Amino acid sequence: MTIEISNESGIDVDETVLLRLTEHNLGELKVSADADVAILLVDEGAMESLHVQWMDEPGPTDVLSFPMDELRPGTEDMPTPPGLLGDIVLCPQVAEAQAAAARHSTTDELILLTTHGLLHLLGFDHAEPEEEREMFGLQRELIASFHAAERRRPRA
């Protein structure tokens, strides 16, 4: 599994947390160990450009996902085949503002956004109420299981 993280945002982000999170979530979703995903952190200007270009909406957003091989979650018996999941683009500046409004840390907000973006790469959406319930429920489960795994992780 290749998880490439590139921080071009100018904001200091604990990339190791995002790496562990993505590894955890891909394992929980039974995605092949040979699947690739890229996470790019950008500033508000770059995110606004992407938001306008791809969503035709003004202003920066928190997360955008760009699926590639249309992979879906696997099962224990049949994991997702190898392939290129795609790119998750995060804007830490927007995440900081949202974290302050939600009264949690920027890292917690980036965990939520990264998980959300990964689910979009795997074909989940929230346009319809039923889709939203499924996606957000799975998102909550993944984040809770990641936090539990983090609590069990040996500290150096």
Image (tube, rainbow, N blue to C red):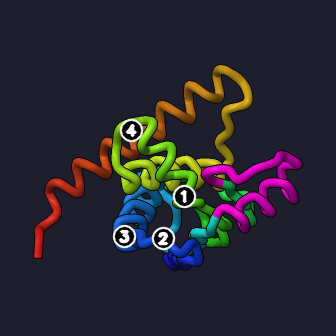
Q: CA distance from mark 4 to mark 2?
A: 28 Å
- Pointers 1 and 3 in contact (C-beta within 8 Å): no
Say left or right for 45 vs 102.
right
Looking at the rendered image, the disc whose residue lies closer to the viewer, 1 or 4, is 1
Determine whether the residue tagged by mark 1 lies in a helix, strand or loop: helix
Judge whether 66 appears above or below 55 on screen: below
Looking at the rendered image, the disc whose residue lies closer to the viewer, 3 or 2, is 2
Q: Earlier in the sequence, mark 4 or mark 2?
A: 2
Q: Indicate the position of residue 69 as horizontal and vertical percent values.
A: 74, 65
Question: Which residue is denoted by mark 2 in the rendering?
Answer: 11
Q: CA distance from mark 3 to mark 4?
A: 22 Å
The image's mark for residue 141 is: 4
Q: Indicate the position of residue 122 as horizontal and vertical percent values.
A: 63, 52
The magenta-colored residue range is 44-63
Q: Earlier in the sequence, mark 1 or mark 3?
A: 3
Question: Which residue is denoted by mark 1 in the rendering?
Answer: 93
Choose top left, top right, bottom left or bottom right for residue 128.
top right
Say left or right for 14 vs 9.
left
Determine whether the residue tagged by mark 3 lies in a helix, strand or loop: loop
User: Is the residue marked by circle 2 packed among few (<14), some (14-19), or many (20+) residues within 10 Å?
Assistant: some
Question: Which residue is denoted by mark 3 in the rendering?
Answer: 14
Rendered residue at 57%/72% (across/down): 9
User: Is the residue marked by circle 4 packed among few (<14), some (14-19), or many (20+) residues within 10 Å?
Assistant: some
Residue type at the position of mark 1: Gln
Looking at the rendered image, the disc whose residue lies closer to the viewer, 1 or 3, is 1
